Image (spheres, rainbow, N blue to C red):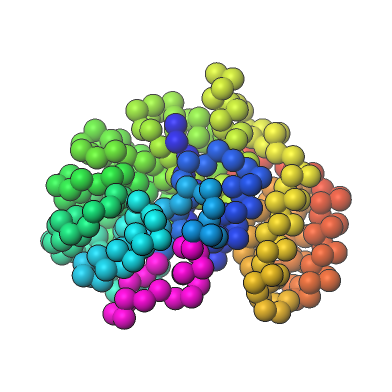
Amino acid sequence: MKYYFAPMEGVTGYIYRNAHHKFFPGIDKYYTPFVATNQNLKFKTREINDLLPEHNQGIPLVPQVISNNATHFVEMVKQIQEFGYEEVNLNLGCPSGTVVSKFKGSGFLAKPDDLDVFLDEIYSKLDVKLSIKTRIGKDSPEEFKRILAIYNKYPVYELTIHPRIRADFYKNKPNLEVFEEAVKESKNPICYNGDLFTVEDCNQFHERFPEVPAVMLGRGLIRNPNLVLDTLHGETQGIIMNCAAYQTLDKKVLKQFHDQIYHDYQEVMSGDINTIHKMKELWHYMSSLFTNYEQYEKKIKRTNKLSDYDRIIAELFRNEEIAHEAKPGF
């Protein structure tokens, strides 16, 4: 089984990736937060910093691009190839209102004919491994039968399916019945994404879909950066681990992981507030790893000074332990 780290804007940039790769190995691919194509065909400074090979040394990284314009997509992918990347991922899953209103991300799924023309052009003009991350429709899961038939026309390097429609955002349960049908009907390699928060979740998925060779983890992996190592441990032991999914997570290592991210943000961000804002985004997911985390979560949300932040984090790591709850609360 291969494990991929899903992209999340504001959290999983190169600073986070470097720290995670250092302290929690086991990820087969990391994906960048998406780069949006534009008419001037130029990357933003932030996007260039995230893509630079010197900022991602030794990290198996796949850039992700969002677009509905084939000409723009082709030209920007060619620029990405100049950085040395051999695979690029097309985002057809983002449910954000501002993205969908432009018929990008999961919004593009509402125009299957246009999507077909788009894919025909990019696959005919690019010499690169083109993978796709998709939802199963914009408004209804019944849309996916036609969408999958379109994907089957092209040599998709890997098709990552998040079995929700756009209207679900991240609510409701992933539609595993539609995913099961896709596993049977897809002519391209399949990767699964959606609500794998714990070792138990991963093992239950593997039991139901042993033929699926890869999964993409997002919120669950940000919450518990050791999740893949925990799951791999369960696989090597030949057992299905119970809900105590975080017993192997070392609090000292977690603190070192945090400290590297915190330090590196201070090196590149200007001012206390910008650094703390980045750390708040991380703690939105990671705080529930700890016992009695609610009181610390509130304090982190309120603070705007590094000195106060340092004190709160020191108290959290000193006073609390890693929690053993089955499901995170996002």
Q: Is residue 116 magenta?
A: no
Q: Position of residue 319 (x, y in %)?
A: 86, 50
Quarter of the image with the C terminus in it: bottom right
Task: Give the residue displayed 84% in from the left and 71% down from the top.
Answer: 307
Side of 86 relative to 204 (left or right): left
Evaluate whether residue 23 shows in this view.
Answer: yes
Q: Position of residue 189 (x, y in %)?
A: 29, 38
Q: How many marks?
A: 0
Task: Give the residue displayed 45% in from the left and 36% down from the top.
Answer: 2
| 214 up-or-down from 73: above or below | above
Q: Position of residue 277 (x, y in %)?
A: 65, 71
Q: Residue furthest top?
A: 238
Quarter of the image with the N terminus in it: top left
Please tell me in which quadrant of the rendered image residue 94 appears.
bottom left
| 311 up-or-down from 174: above or below | below
Task: Give the residue displayed 18% in from the left and 44% down from the top.
Answer: 152
Please tell me in which quadrant of the rendered image residue 79 appears.
bottom left
Looking at the rendering, the stretch of residues picked out in magenta corresponds to: 35-52
Side of 265 relative to 57 (left or right): right
Please tell me in which quadrant of the rendered image residue 241 appears.
top right
Q: Position of residue 173 (x, y in %)?
A: 43, 46
| Of residues 180 and 36, the one drawn nearer to the viewer in this rendering | 36
Evaluate whether residue 65 shows in this view.
Answer: no
| Of residues 270 and 169, the one drawn nearer to the viewer in this rendering | 270
Side of 236 relative to 260 (left or right): left
Task: Give the residue displayed 22% in from the left and 63% down from the top.
Answer: 110
